[in-house]
Image (cartoon, rainbow, N blue to C red):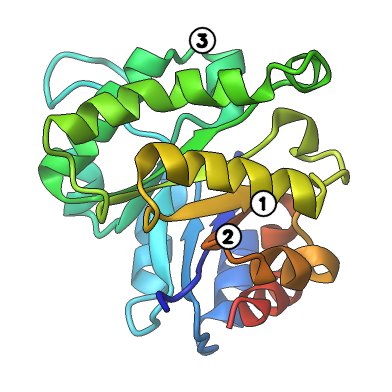
Amino acid sequence: MARKHVVGNWKMNGSAAAIDEVLDALQNQSFDASVSVCVPYPYLGQAVAKLKKSAIRVGAQNVSEYGDGAYTGEVSARMLKDIGCAEVIIGHSERRRYFAESDAAVAAKLARLLEVGLFAVVCVGETLAERDGGRAEAAIESQLAPLRALMARGASPERFCVAYEPIWAIGTGRAASLDQIASMHELIKRHLGASFSVLYGGSVKAGNASAILTLPAVDGVLVGGASLDAQEFADICRAAA
Ligand code: PEP
């Protein structure tokens, strides 16, 4: 069985000192799971240096859909690879919502990451209105369509995973139920392949991680708020054994 994957998303939080503190607490721990922390851009170099001897990988939370060039304020996939990043979260619902990131932009970002050989964590998720209106599956299927198209053109399913993150579960303390998680993960695997890696995200904590990670269709978790606490994040990583 493949190792579970635990991804920490620190979002736009922290300072050089606070990030050092969390990394200090994590750097000497070893986990059976594959673990990564996705830190804000300014602290990526610091995290890469700090985790040089650790198996914990460093990731970013976004990437430009363009290659190097005249795109002021953007950060390219090549640059992230150059400084030692191993993976990148794309299509997070906060980016789709606050920065109008479209499915097409997410697919372009995925293509850039695949080009340079960086692993991608592609987030998909439905709103509460979509879930309550019985449209959750359709919403996820439409977000998967551009990924399927890339796969049809040769994108390797080994080089990226999908994180199913119901928007109503992110940062709310209300995780999806085990049934909801299992059925959506099974749907995603029906579309992308039975062995395709699907993570769950949305209010994962030390207290619910083990039940979620035990579901056969769950290949790992994407953790927001709880990943800022080194002790709780380490407990979640251990639950992914
Ligand atoms: C996230 O940021 O992707 C997330 C799942 O956040 P939280 O764990 O805080 O719900």
- Is 17 left, or right, of 155 in this rendering? right
Q: Position of residue 125 (x, y in %)?
A: 61, 30
- Quarter of the image for the C terminus: give it: bottom right
Amino acid type indicated by mark 2: Val
Q: Position of residue 7 (x, y in %)?
A: 53, 59
Mark 3 or 2, nearer chain start? 3
**Front-most of residues 117 and 195:** 195
Residue, x 59% and y 27% (percent of image)? 93
Q: Residues within 10 Å of mark 1 (few under 14, many from 20)?
A: some
Label 3: which residue?
100
Amino acid type indicated by mark 3: Ala
Q: Position of residue 98 (x, y in %)?
A: 60, 15
Residue 109 lies in what quarter of the image? top left
Label 1: which residue?
182
Amino acid type indicated by mark 1: Ala
Residue 178 lies in what quarter of the image? bottom right
Do the residues under discs 1 and 2 have CB atoms within 8 angstroms? Answer: yes
The Cα atoms of the two marked residues, 3 and 2, are separated by 28 Å
Do the residues under discs 3 and 2 have CB atoms within 8 angstroms? Answer: no
- Is 77 left, or right, of 240 in this rendering? left
**Front-most of residues 35 and 198:** 198
Q: Which mark is residue 218?
A: 2
Observer-side mark, 1 or 2, equals 1
